């Protein structure tokens, strides 16, 4: 089986210089832009505090808010479905699509539909899902996976995209200017917007008080999908509910400034159930658990659910900047992915992710809802280690740690080991550094140096130092004597 | 057990360990962020105009309602808009003489798509972000009307401008309670998905012009 752990995937990604250049350009640009527009608001820190407080309070009464949301959406002519897991959500969505005899659906960028692997299931059911966000469309046409939450096709350059468009749908030649390529996408998708009967979206938030659902976007493909088809299906994680309509005044300021670094994104749509003569005449809201209640139950990690998917933590992360998104093997990447994915999929599948961080804390500093990602990473590292121990697999790191524990357990043992080590390291230590440990220990030195043992231990130095009063004077004692 | 009951039960189970005495949602701590921006009208107009220019929006000025039709006709001619659709309830005095506007009385999607441009009013504008807010109220029409034509000419009254987003949300609250669809528009659609180069105009109207009415 292919090794899909973070270190294995990262090693391959690090060799892709084009990818690294693109990712660095993207993260640097967006990082500067988000910092500028956040600093522009005098009350940015107050907004972050309010965002965190609203999310925290919402989680404490999540049941009440979801039930109210269901009631309001239903009262406004919508239908609410509940899905315990990914499979149930797929069945609901495919079932609705089939009832309308649709052979294709148009989709708005939605990470939650990626989380439940909706597209492969739709293909299997004979329904073609058409991604309409430009980047998602590029990724879909190329048979790729996204590499960034916000700009999923950042690993592709314009020449590649031109070739792709020419091969897949463009009649005749295109230039590789972004303007030309974007216009080609507009022509290609227009017909699909006008004639596809079913649309599928995610949701940035839903308001319990009013039953309104909201989508924040830039390109207008969202408005097309939310307005033109007869049927709209929106899939939403249960943690996205907000209690009051006025909570939007906080999140509509936090989200665009943290995500794309704009003061406001071009289009934000809010709709409530069904409106006669305007927009889809059938609306389905699918509320998804898929592991979220498990995260809710873990007090130390619950904050993970506060995430508004802005991706600001990706753009400041030194690890993400080097590896890009593919190394995380998930639609959720970067620091937030490192805590969210293992909790959704379990340690067995994603146990390496909590270690994919230097714990530098930049993600926590910029998070618009103040999620303490480093603290949760440490919490999950403990969990992953426990899980590994419980699985009884032979683990070189655990063995090494046990050996160290035994060595440090007795003075004589330690002294003997140090003496032997000094002899043994002669062959491999250079300038106080060991750059390659022998045998199974090489895993440690593959990516870092190991300090060699110094010529004398502290105990030996202490024992051999000259008696008090006879030591050679140091500058400090000389001064005292004067 | 139904999925609904099971998820609610799981949530209640997860909340069982919560510390009592944390602030309930019904009485959140008084938030410290700004709820309004008390700037004078001139400052609001200036900020709003500056933000719109940043988005590549052209701003035209009309002194009073009586001047709107004339300003609109001139701009539509300059933009070469040959056919114009309008909401059926657009104020008669706003309507340009050329091109003769077609009222959206249940026009088909294809007819809307074929229109050269659309002219509407709006509920309000947000100065700090250069945002125009539509709530399908008087003079705004349904959502598809302001989406399908490639050109949108929007009339914004200076008196409708608010300072910051919380003021807009406050004004929208009663409308949301009535189920009105709400659209926030901050400049024409845009993408930066290809090598982060910003391209103005993807789907929806690629050009947005605003008539500011004093």
Image: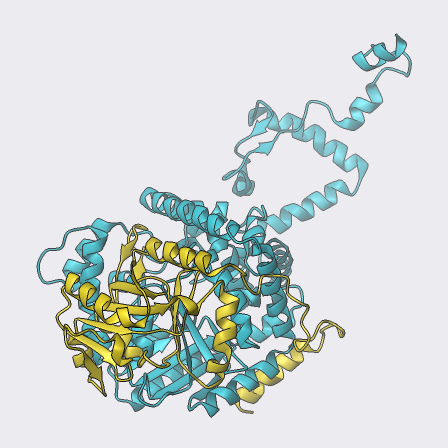
Chain colours: A cyan, B yellow
In the rendered view, would you say B178 is above or below B160? Answer: below
The outermost residue toward the left is A172
Q: Position of residue B71 (x, y in %)?
A: 23, 66
Query: Position of A369 compared to A227: left or right?
Result: right
Residue at the (15%, 75%) spot, across then down: B114
Occupied quadrant, residue A455: top right
Instruction: Please identify the residue farthest to the top as the structure is shown.
Output: A482
Total of numbered circles in the picture? Answer: 0
Horizontal and vertical percent position of residue B74: 18, 64
The residue drawn where x is 89% and y is 16% is A467
Q: From where the camera sits, is residue B93 visible?
A: yes
Q: Residue furthest right?
A: A469
Please state, as top left, top right, bottom left or bottom right, where the N terminus of chain A lies in the image. bottom left
Above or below, B75 against B183 in this view is: above
- Front-most of A416 and A141? A141
Residue A262 occupies which quadrant of the picture? bottom left
**Residue A352 visible in the current orientation:** no
Q: Position of residue A279 (x, y in %)?
A: 32, 83
The residue nearer to you, when weighing A453 against B159, is: B159
Assign the C terminus of chain A to one quadrant of the image. Answer: top right
In front here: A103 or A8?
A103
Q: Residue at x 13, y 55 (%)?
A: A174
In the rendered image, residue B14, in percent from the top left (x then y), is placed at 65, 76
At x 47% / y 81%, what residue is drawn?
Answer: B176
């Amino acid at each position: 089986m292919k090794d899909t752990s973070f270190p294995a995937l990262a090693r391959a990604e690090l060799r892709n210089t084009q990818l690294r250049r693109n990712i660095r350009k993207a993260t640097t640009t967006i990082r500067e832009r988000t910092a500028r527009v956040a600093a522009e608001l005098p009350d940015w820190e107050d907004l972050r505090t309010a965002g965190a407080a609203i999310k925290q309070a919402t989680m404490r009464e999540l049941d009440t808010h979801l039930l109210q949301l269901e009631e309001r959406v239903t009262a406004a002519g919508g239908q609410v479905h509940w899905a315990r897991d990914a499979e149930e959500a797929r069945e609901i969505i495919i079932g609705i699509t089939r009832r309308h005899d649709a052979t294709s659906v148009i989709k708005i960028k939605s990470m939650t539909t990626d989380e439940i692997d909706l597209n492969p299931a739709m293909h299997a059911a004979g329904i073609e899902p058409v991604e309409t966000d430009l980047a998602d469309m590029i990724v879909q046409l190329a048979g790729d996976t996204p590499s960034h939450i916000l700009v999923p096709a950042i690993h592709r350059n314009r020449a590649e995209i031109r070739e792709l468009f020419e091969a897949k749908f463009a009649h005749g030649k295109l230039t590789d200017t972004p303007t030309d390529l974007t216009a080609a996408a507009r022509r290609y998708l227009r017909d699909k917007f006008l004639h596809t009967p079913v649309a599928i979206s995610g949701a940035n938030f839903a308001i319990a008080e009013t039953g309104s659902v909201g989508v924040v976007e830039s390109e207008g493909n969202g408005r097309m999908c939310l307005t033109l088809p007869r049927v709209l299906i929106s899939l939403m994680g249960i943690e996205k509910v907000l209690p009051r309509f006025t909570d939007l005044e906080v999140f509509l300021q936090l989200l665009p400034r943290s995500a794309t670094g704009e003061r406001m994104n071009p289009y934000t749509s809010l709709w409530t159930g069904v409106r006669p003569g305007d927009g889809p005449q059938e609306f389905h809201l699918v509320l998804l658990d898929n592991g979220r209640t498990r995260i809710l139950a873990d007090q130390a990690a619950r904050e993970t659910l506060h995430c508004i998917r802005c991706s600001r933590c990706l753009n400041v992360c030194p690890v993400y900047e080097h590896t890009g998104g593919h190394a995380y093997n998930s639609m959720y990447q970067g620091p937030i992915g490192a805590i969210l994915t293992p909790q959704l999929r379990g340690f067995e599948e994603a146990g390496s992710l909590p270690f994919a961080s230097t714990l530098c804390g930049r993600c926590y500093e910029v998070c618009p809802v103040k999620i303490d990602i480093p603290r949760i990473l440490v919490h999950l590292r403990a969990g992953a280690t426990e899980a590994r121990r419980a699985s009884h697999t032979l683990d070189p790191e655990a063995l090494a740690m046990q050996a160290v524990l035994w060595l440090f357990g007795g003075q004589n043992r330690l002294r003997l080991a140090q003496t032997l080590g000094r002899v043994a390291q002669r062959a491999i230590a250079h300038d106080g550094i060991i750059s390659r440990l022998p045998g199974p220990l090489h895993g440690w030195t593959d990516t870092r140096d190991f300090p060699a043992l110094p010529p004398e231990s502290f105990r030996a130095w202490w024992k051999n130092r000259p008696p008090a009063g006879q030591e050679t004077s140091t500058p400090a004692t000389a001064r005292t004597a004067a | 057990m139904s999925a609904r009951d099971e998820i609610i039960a799981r949530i209640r189970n997860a909340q069982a360990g919560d510390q009592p005495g944390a602030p309930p949602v019904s009485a959140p701590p008084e938030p410290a962020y700004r709820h309004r921006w008390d700037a004078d009208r001139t400052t609001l107009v200036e900020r709003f105009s500056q933000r719109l220019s940043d988005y590549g929006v052209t701003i035209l000025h009309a002194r009073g309602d009586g001047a709107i039709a004339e300003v609109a006709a001139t701009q539509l001619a300059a933009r070469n808009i040959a056919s114009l659709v309008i909401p059926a309830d657009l104020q008669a005095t706003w309507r340009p003489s050329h091109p003769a506007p077609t009222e959206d009385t249940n026009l088909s999607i294809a007819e809307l798509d074929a229109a050269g441009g659309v002219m509407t009013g709006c509920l309000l504008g947000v100065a700090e972000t250069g945002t125009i807010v539509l709530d399908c109220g008087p003079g705004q029409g349904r959502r598809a009307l302001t989406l399908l034509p490639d050109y949108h000419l929007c009339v914004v009254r200076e008196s409708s401008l608010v300072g910051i987003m919380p003021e807009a949300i406050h004004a929208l609250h009663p409308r949301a309670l009535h189920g009105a669809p709400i659209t926030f528009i901050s400049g024409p659609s845009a993408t930066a998905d290809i090598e982060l180069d910003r391209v103005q105009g993807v789907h929806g109207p690629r050009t947005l012009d605003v008539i500011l009415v004093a």
